[in-house]
Image: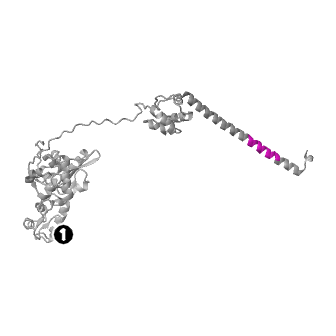
Amino acid sequence: MVGLFQTRERRALVVFLLLAGVFVAGLLLAERRKSAVSADRVEAEMEATVAADSVRLFEFDPNTVEYADLRRLGLSSRMAVSLLKYRAAGKVFRIPEDVATCYGMTDSVYFILEPYIRIGREYALTPSPRREYREYVPQEPRRIVPRERFRIDTVSASYLASLGFSVRQAEAIVRYRDLYEGLRDEAGFRACYMIADSVADLLLPYVIFPKPEPVRSGLIELNGADSATLRSVVGIGEKSVMAIIRYRERLGGFYSVDQLAEVPQVTESNFERIVKQIYCDSFKIRKIDINFAPPSTLKGHPYLPPAVFRKLFSKRQLKGGWSTVEELVEEHILTPREAERLAPYLRFTVREASKDIPNGESASSGWSPAPIQDTIH
């Protein structure tokens, strides 16, 4: 047979057979694609026929509904299977709108189904409790009952509350005092927005104000003076000036000129001369948060000797803190005298429900360790 065809003819025959094979393969692929499209069309027509013939809308829970019920509701097989797969993956339908998030769910189908979706009680979101509105009943104003004289520059919020102020009022007065230093005299006391005129009239005879600003030259404020200024005071020498500054730093400031006598380098004779040339602005005292201050801050205070500091710190670790200086006396951490000296330097911050509530500084210099017996009306 090789002799029947020449070389050129054999090549042409091979090319023809290859082209014929490609043509036949193309016809087969086109026929298969046409058949697939026809099958999809038939399936879609069957879906439409099934939906048109058997749709019946009824109430259903998407958390428990079965495939057959979904088909009867008019969902296509793909939509029904998608919802079931969604549920099998752990999805819980809490609200009707969750059904619209299923893959393949169209807005038009969900719009038809939405009025019939009923979420079971065990799956639905817990409804918010109904609020009970009570009729407002006006209450009689709280009556302020003063007991004894107190220093307004160091008085605590708890002490003010014991006089009859509400807790919020007492805390606001202390914040007003510390932030604006507005309670230095009667005018500043009356200007405080939390103190009514009638309350001011009642309390003013009991309020001890800090000494006013000096009116004559040469009177020096002890808490703000630097070493050169203190050195200009007659009676304060080279050695005593540094001792006063160091002691002032350890204290956090002086609330009374009498505390100057606690400095060993200040002799009795010099003290008599010094007090005539100085005064103290107790608003400049540096407060200590007794409940949250680091041990180093507490340990260095002159009014907290080592034995008292150890007792206080160990109790704080166990209890967590205190709200008044009276508690420190009741728990035998401080003596009444120690509490009276330390009180002006303390701030009590109580942590409640992840919220810090400052209860103000501790009691005044006229603080009494006896428990409060007065009844607040």
Query: Which is nearer the eye, 90 or 257?
Result: 90
Query: Which is nearer the eye, 233 or 35?
Result: 35
Measuring from the top left, give residue 18's x and y in whole percent.
80, 46
Q: Amino acid at mark 1?
A: Ser
State the colouring used for the structure image: one colour
In-image side of 320 versus 152 (left or right): right
Q: Which residue is mark 1?
A: 227
Task: Tell me the quarter of the picture where residue 153 sits.
Answer: bottom left
Numbered disc 1: secondary structure: helix
| Residue occupying the point 72% across, 39% down | 31
Q: Is residue 352 above or below residue 216?
A: above
In-image side of 318 versus 47 (left or right): left
Q: Is residue 271 above or below residue 27?
A: below
Q: Is residue 250 magenta?
A: no
Say if residue 20 shows up in the picture. yes
Please tell me whether the stretch drawn in magenta is mainly helix, strand or loop: helix
Query: Which is nearer the eye, 204 or 271?
Result: 204
Residues drawn in magenta: 16-27
Say if residue 89 shows up in the picture. no
**Outermost right residue:** 3
Measuring from the top left, give residue 23's x and y in whole percent.
77, 44
| Residue occupying the point 59% across, 30% down | 49
Q: Is residue 26 magenta?
A: yes
- Image quadrant holding the C terminus, namely top left
Measuring from the top left, give residue 165's x and y in whole percent.
15, 47
